[in-house]
Image (spheres, helix red, strand yellow):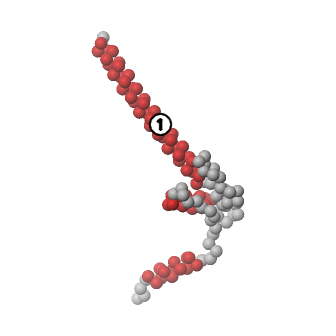
Amino acid sequence: MSFLLADVAEVLTFETAVILILAAGLLVLAKSVSDLRSEVRTLRGGKSPDQKAPPAGSPASAPGTDGEIPADVFAAIVSAVHYTLGDSHHVVSVSPAESLAWSREGRRSIFRSHSPR
């Protein structure tokens, strides 16, 4: 009979340990999901609990309202800035290029790097 009680006590402690480990894993997962949700909300221009709301007329509050830059392109630009530079930098405005000078200079640079035959 004492062997049976010892086995029951061992199983209960093992089950308790497994339950505690699973609970800790679920808590870590819940925290990760919460952090990810707040990052997505921030990148979409929404208000985060620990961040002030952007000014009403800023592009971060209403991306693509002027019809020039689509919302998905705006989100890609903001996420790239956030990933590259971190939380200390914020996108103030995004506008399309006014001229083709950058693309032309890039083509010139490529053509200059090739040696003529």
Q: Position of residue 105 (x, y in %)?
A: 53, 80
Count of numbered marks: 1
Spot the residue most to the left: 3
Could you say which is closer to the camera, residue 63 or residue 67? Answer: 63
Q: Residue at 62% across / 62% down in the picture? A: 92
Q: Is residue 5 above or below residue 106?
A: above
In this picture, residue 58 sits left or right of residue 27: right
Q: Residue at 63% across / 50% down in the picture? A: 47
In this picture, residue 87 sits left or right of residue 68: left
Q: Position of residue 106 (x, y in %)?
A: 51, 78
Quadrant including the N terminus: top left
Spot the residue most to the top: 1
Quadrant including the C terminus: bottom left
Q: Amino acid at mark 1?
A: Leu
Identify the residue under disc 1.
Answer: 26
Confirm whether residue 3 shows in the render: yes
Q: Is residue 68 above or below residue 9?
A: below
In this picture, residue 13 sits left or right of residue 57: left
User: In terms of secondary structure, where does tag 1 sit?
Assistant: helix
In this picture, residue 12 sits left or right of residue 105: left
Image quadrant where residue 67 sits: bottom right
Image quadrant where residue 104 sits: bottom right
Q: Position of residue 27 (x, y in %)?
A: 48, 37
Q: Residue at 54% across / 56% down in the picture? A: 87
Q: Position of residue 19 (x, y in %)?
A: 42, 29
